[in-house]
Image (cartoon, coloured by chain):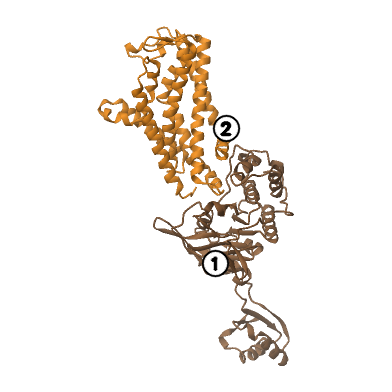
Chain colours: A orange, B brown
Amino acid sequence: MGHIYREFIKILFQKRTYFGWAGLFLVPFIIAAAMRLSQEGPPAPEQGGPPFIHLIELNGLYVAPAALLALASFLLPMLASMAGSQTIAGEAEKGTLRTILMQPVRRGSILLAKWFVANVYIALGLLILLAGSLAAGGVFYGLKPMMLLTGQTVGVAEGLWLTFLAYLFVLAGMAAVVSLGVALSTLTDSGLTAMAAGLVLVIIMLILGSLSVFDFLRPYLFTSHFDAFTNLFARPIDFVPLGKALANFAAWTIGMTLIAWVIFRKKDILS
Amino acid sequence: MCARTPLQTPALAHTEAVSANAAVDDGRRVVLSTHGLTKDFGKLRALDHLDLTVYEGDVFGFLGPNGAGKTTALRLIFGLTYPTSGYVDVLGYRVPEQRREALRYIGGFVDDPMFYPNMSARRNLRLIAEMNQKVSDKRIAEVLEMVGLADRADSKVGSYSHGMRQRLGIALALIHRPALVVLDEPTSGLDPQGMRDVRELIRELGRQGITVLLSSHLLHEVELVCNRAAIVNKGRLVVQGPVSELRPADNVVKILTREQLRAAEVIRALVPGEKLRQDGEYLVLQDSPDLIPEVVRRLVLAGIDVLSVAPAKEHSLEEMFLELTGDSEEG
């Protein structure tokens, strides 16, 4: 627990932590304000538009899943990649990695504490995004009973619960991105290099997932599963894509963290 | 840079109870030893079968030119890197296998001490030191006072000068009263007064029986503060032992008399001609230290006034270092 506490203190002393969180808080307000100012409004899903956004004008509760859907494809993976890639490489670059590893600590414990706190950073970011979404939706449109994507209506409390589950689902997806970042972070002493490598890989996965010729790869790319949370807003819930997505996230998370652990355990600290 | 606050030396620290596993050699407890310590980086052999022995209470100088392998050895001692072969023994604990146990007895830094720039010195010390064991506010204040940073304890380390970070590194090294303090060029970046303060602090550590391994390229620094030293060059140990024994015996003597020609005749009867030469107003006698009393006696018996007999040249550790490493560049 001591390592986790210390790692958390470290991120609280970094300005970029607050920039990331502030950005996440502002995004829902930007979406809600844009909807209010827009003359035409976005197209409905049946006209090729994304789900949720066209419903915001009817119910502020939709700001939360709409913001999540908008950010899950790029900004959130970017933040998660950044958080993961700074864990080891960021400290190596500053020279503080050797300072902490000259203390009688287990390298594995340090790595896991850093991995955990990077995920906590993203979890808090998602919580801030959710709070901002509810605040923006409430202020601009009010929070009302929610009509699901399949037409049924649920109360505000259940709507909030489904939204919370959707955020938890995306957090699981971001854990895979964080783990990829951590693994890359053990390979270099440059935080920037690790971050760039993480972002490039996420972008490559997004591109591969969007090209039909690479459809056979889609089940294995974590980026292809981030939007599976939309199934939570249907009745009956289709658990198959949700299960596949969670299995994918778990495989990436465990695999990448294991790779990071194997590399870091025997890494020569030369920074 | 903050206003100069001298380093405090009294009641500095004391060696905690050390491991009973520590080896004993010649009646002295071995705090640190390296055994065939070798490190390769690809095809480059950075350290080649290094065997060092540092005894309890030693202030041990670790000397070598740039690239000699000093920092490589220190990284291996702290378990930051893994040896290609060989191992380090710290009070009976092997590094890298028992790295965590060994590190409980070591404090110090390798290269420049680095800290979190957005945090104060006080918070840095607490955050890092508590990775080892709990540390009290009082102890943090004590070590900051010791290194002259008490008045800047709550300033962000990012605002510190290089010298102040060096001092903070020393504070962190001492905070748990370790049995072995390892300092890598601790006076680098300090002004002359700062250097003097740090050297005095190291001497005081030695006086209190704390073992210090001081890596330095400043030979006079080692001569000033260390009782034992090792010289490494190109990854290999050149020599190690007491500093007083590392310095070569002075074996060239200058003799000044009132009658140099007659004096030379008298001395030639005692020593081979090639051992004696004239250098200005002096006669210079080489490699015959045992004969000096007899030479002086004969000169006096011959009625020659001997005005002075003195070593022709003071051999410093620096000269010996340059001779051994075959390198005229200090550093």
Q: Position of residue A116 (x, y in %)?
A: 50, 35
Whether residue A31 is visible to the viewer of this picture, yes or no, is no
- B190 or B83: nearer the eye? B83
Q: Which chain carries label 2?
A: A
Q: In which quarter of the image is residue B181?
A: bottom right
- Relative to residue A198, is residue B208 drawn left or right? right
Q: In this view, does B328 lie above or below B129?
A: below
Q: In this view, does A203 lie above or below B157?
A: above
- Relative to residue B92, is residue B2 drawn left or right? right
Label 1 to label 2: alpha-carbon separation: 50 Å
Q: How crowded is mark 2: few (under 14 residues within 10 Å), some or many (20 or more)?
A: few
Q: Position of residue B170 (x, y in %)?
A: 64, 50
> Residue furthest toward the left?
A213
Q: Name the residue under label 2.
A: A12
- B135 or B218: nearer the eye? B135
Q: Going 71% across and 51% down the picture, which residue do you hit? A: B7
Give the amino acid type for the residue marked by disc 1 in the picture.
Leu
Q: Where is residue B291 in the image (x, y as percent from the top left)?
A: 64, 86
Q: Which of marks 1 and 2 is in front?
A: 2
Give the amino acid type for the residue marked by disc 2 in the picture.
Leu
Q: Mark 1 lies on which chain?
A: B
Quick one: SS at disc 2? helix
Q: Are marks 1 and 2 in contact (CB under 8 Å)?
A: no
- A225 or B300: nearer the eye? A225
Quick one: SS at disc 1? helix
Q: Mark 1 points at which residue?
A: B322
Q: Quadrant of residue A246?
A: top left
Q: Position of residue B67 (x, y in %)?
A: 49, 58
Quadrant for the N terminus of chain B, please.
top right
- Relative to residue A224, is residue B181 drawn left or right? right
Whether residue A63 is visible to the viewer of this picture, yes or no, is yes
